[in-house]
């Protein structure tokens, strides 16, 4: 290398720093084990999108405000732009891609589709995950509880009316399924 080639030297140094800093991160995502080497500063949302190609989790603000990046980690909703991938070491993660099983939509997805709870769809993955979290804990929420359940998810399109309607329909579907399973 030409000793005065500053750009090449900078690239070489950057590569050396990156290689030194790589950390192995392992987690279970949507019922599958994954392990990758990443820079310690990698955000969980970028790990999911860029390393695992799970691009259903969206990045809206990158500052914890919009909720588009909401996922379920160890049973609780988290905004994945606020978590480092290394903090999710050995975690159990569910993203929007993990809702459907055996090519069958989750009842919450069906309810949003049937009740026009989606317009541009940018907020939808996060809202679906918040809905799941709410309905797992509170199978028959009131409208107020539903609105509180998604108050960390911003939607610019729907005015929330159809989101609420969809979540009420999802609650009915899930309760119906439970009753059928019990009979
Ligand atoms: Fe994470 Fe907006 S991208 S809260
Ligand atoms: Fe467009 Fe919610 S459907 S932001």
Image: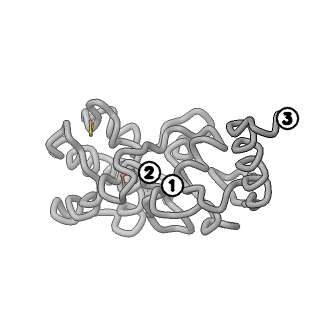
Which residue does the numbered mark 2 point to in the structure image?
177
Give the mark, 2 or 3, whose residue is nearer the N terminus.
3
Residue in view at x 61 percent, y 41 percent: 50
Q: Which mark is residue 1?
A: 3
Taking 151 as reference, is 168 above or below it? Answer: above
Q: Where is residue 13? Give x, y as percent.
A: 74, 49
Kindly report which numbered mark, 1 or 3, lies closer to the viewer in this rendering.
3
Q: Quadrant of residue 110?
A: top left
Asked if labels 2 and 1 touch by Cβ distance under 8 angstroms, the answer is yes
- Local SS, label 3: loop
Q: Which mark is residue 181?
A: 1
> Which of the colour schemes (rainbow, by chain, secondary structure, one colour) is used?
one colour
Taking 56 as reference, is 177 above or below it? Answer: below
Report, in whole angstroms, how far the alpha carbon at label 2 lies from the one at label 3: 67 Å
Residue in view at x 45 percent, y 62 percent: 82
- Local SS, label 1: helix
């Amino acid at each position: 290398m030409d000793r005065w080639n500053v750009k090449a030297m900078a690239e070489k140094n950057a590569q050396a720093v990156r290689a030194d800093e790589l950390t192995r991160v392992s987690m279970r995502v949507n019922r599958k084990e994954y392990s990758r080497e990443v820079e310690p500063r990698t955000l969980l949302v970028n790990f999911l999108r860029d390393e695992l190609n799970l691009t259903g989790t969206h990045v809206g603000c990158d500052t914890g405000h919009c909720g588009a990046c909401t996922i379920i980690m160890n049973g609780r909703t988290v905004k994945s732009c606020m978590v480092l991938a290394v903090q999710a070491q050995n975690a159990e993660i569910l993203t929007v891609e993990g809702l459907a099983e055996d090519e069958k939509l989750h009842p919450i997805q069906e309810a949003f589709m049937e009740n026009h709870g989606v317009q541009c769809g940018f907020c939808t993955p996060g809202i679906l995950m918040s809905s799941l979290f709410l309905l797992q804990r509170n199978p028959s929420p009131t409208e107020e509880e539903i609105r509180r359940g998604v108050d960390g998810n911003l939607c610019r399109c729907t005015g929330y009316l159809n989101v609420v309607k969809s979540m009420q329909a999802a609650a009915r579907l899930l309760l119906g399924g439970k009753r059928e399973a019990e009979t």
